[in-house]
C-alpha cells in the first residue's frame, strides 16, 4: 500500500540469495526490497491461508511450500514465496513454525487511561505488510476514541487512512486493526473507518519514519 516501487530478488536455489534490487512502479520513488541475506527460510508445515501483497487477494499456500520471512512485526508475517509477497496472520504462525502471539493482560479495575494506552500499543502493532513501519508512525491514524456501554464494557472508534486510496491491502489492514483492538480486555467492539479527507501526506509521518525512508 505504500506509494513506492518494491524490488524483489529471487533465490535461484534454497539458501542462495541474489543482490537486493530496486524496481520502479508507475514512476514512483524507489524503495529497497525487504528480501535480503538475513531473511529467514521457512517451509510450510500445513496448508495456510495468506493474503497476497499488495493485491489483497486471499490465497492458500500449500504444505511443503518454501519461502523466506521478510518481515515479522506486530504478530503477523510477510513471507516471500515464488516471487511474491504474502501476509500470514499471527494465528497461522504455526504453519511456519512460529508460536502465536501472547494474550493481553489488564486488571479488572483498569482505568480508561490504561485502556487507552493499550489501544495505542495495539495500533502500533499494526504494520504495513510491505515495509517495517507501524500505522501510527506512518501517520495513518487520524483518531482513536474510547467509548462506554451501559454494561461497563468499552468500545473503540478509529478513523484512519491509507497512503494510497486504491491500495488492495486496505481492507486487510482495517480488519487487522479491528481484530487487534478487540483483543483488549473490556473492549467488546472496535469500529474502524477509512477516511481520505484530509489526504495522507509524508508530513504526517513520524520523524523516525521519515528519516528511515528518506522522505522529507
Image (cartoon, grey):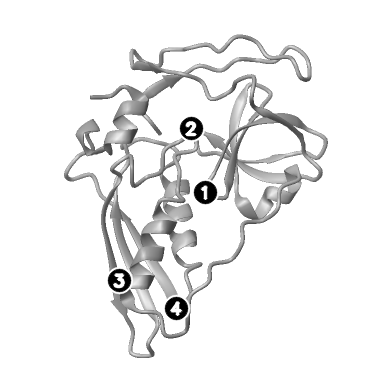
Answer with the quarter of the image where residue 68 lies: top right
Answer with the quarter of the image where residue 135 lies: top left
User: Disc 3, disc 1: CB below 8 Å?
Assistant: no
Q: Is residue 58 left or right of residue 129?
A: right
User: Disc 4, disc 3: CB below 8 Å?
Assistant: no
Residue at 60 percent across and 41 percent down: it is 77
Of labels 4 and 1, earlier in sequence is 1
Of labels 2 and 1, earlier in sequence is 1
User: Disc 2, disc 1: CB below 8 Å?
Assistant: no
Residue at 63 percent across and 21 percent down: it is 83
Neighbor class of circle 2 (other Cα within 10 Å; few <14, some 14-19, many 20+) is many
Answer above or below: position of 32 versus 63. above
Q: From mark 2 to mark 1, how far is it between C-alphas?
A: 13 Å
Residue 31 coordinates in the image, percent (x, y): 42, 19
Label 3 sits on residue: 146
Label 1 sits on residue: 74
Q: From mark 3 to mark 1, how far is it between C-alphas?
A: 22 Å
Answer with the quarter of the image where residue 114 lies: bottom left
Q: Helix, strand, or loop for circle 2? A: loop
In which quadrant is the C terminus drawn? Answer: top left
User: Disc 4, disc 1: CB below 8 Å?
Assistant: no
In which quadrant is the N terminus drawn? Answer: top left
Label 2 sits on residue: 130
Label 4 sits on residue: 186
Question: Which callout, 2 or 1, points to the residue nearer the camera?
Answer: 1
Of labels 4 and 3, earlier in sequence is 3
Amino acid at each position: 500500500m505504500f506509494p513506492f516501487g518494491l524490488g524483489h530478488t529471487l533465490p535461484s536455489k534454497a539458501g542462495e540469495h541474489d543482490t537486493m534490487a530496486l524496481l520502479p512502479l508507475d514512476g514512483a520513488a524507489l524503495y529497497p526490497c525487504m528480501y535480503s541475506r538475513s531473511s529467514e527460510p521457512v517451509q510450510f508445515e500445513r496448508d495456510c491461508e495468506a493474503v497476497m501483497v499488495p493485491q489483497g487477494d486471499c490465497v492458500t499456500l500449500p504444505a511443503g511450500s518454501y519461502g523466506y520471512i521478510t518481515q515479522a512485526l506486530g504478530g503477523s508475517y510477510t513471507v516471500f514465496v515464488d516471487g511474491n509477497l504474502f501476509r500470514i496472520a499471527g494465528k497461522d504462525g504455526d504453519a511456519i513454525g512460529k508460536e502465536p502471539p501472547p494474550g493481553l493482560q489488564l486488571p479488572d479495575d483498569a482505568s480508561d487511561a490504561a485502556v487507552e494506552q493499550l489501544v495505542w500499543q495495539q495500533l502500533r502493532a499494526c504494520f504495513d505488510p510491505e515495509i517495517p513501519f507501524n500505522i501510527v508512525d506512518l501517520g495513518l491514524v487520524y483518531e482513536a476514541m474510547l467509548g462506554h456501554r451501559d454494561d461497563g464494557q468499552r468500545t473503540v472508534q478509529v478513523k484512519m487512512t491509507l497512503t494510497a486510496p486504491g491500495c488492495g491491502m486496505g481492507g486487510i489492514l482495517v480488519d487487522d486493526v479491528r481484530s487487534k483492538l478487540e483483543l483488549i480486555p473490556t473492549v467488546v467492539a472496535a469500529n474502524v473507518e477509512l477516511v481520505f479527507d484530509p489526504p495522507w501526506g509524508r508530513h504526517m509521518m513520524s520523524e523516525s519514519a521519515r528519516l528511515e525512508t528518506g522522505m522529507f
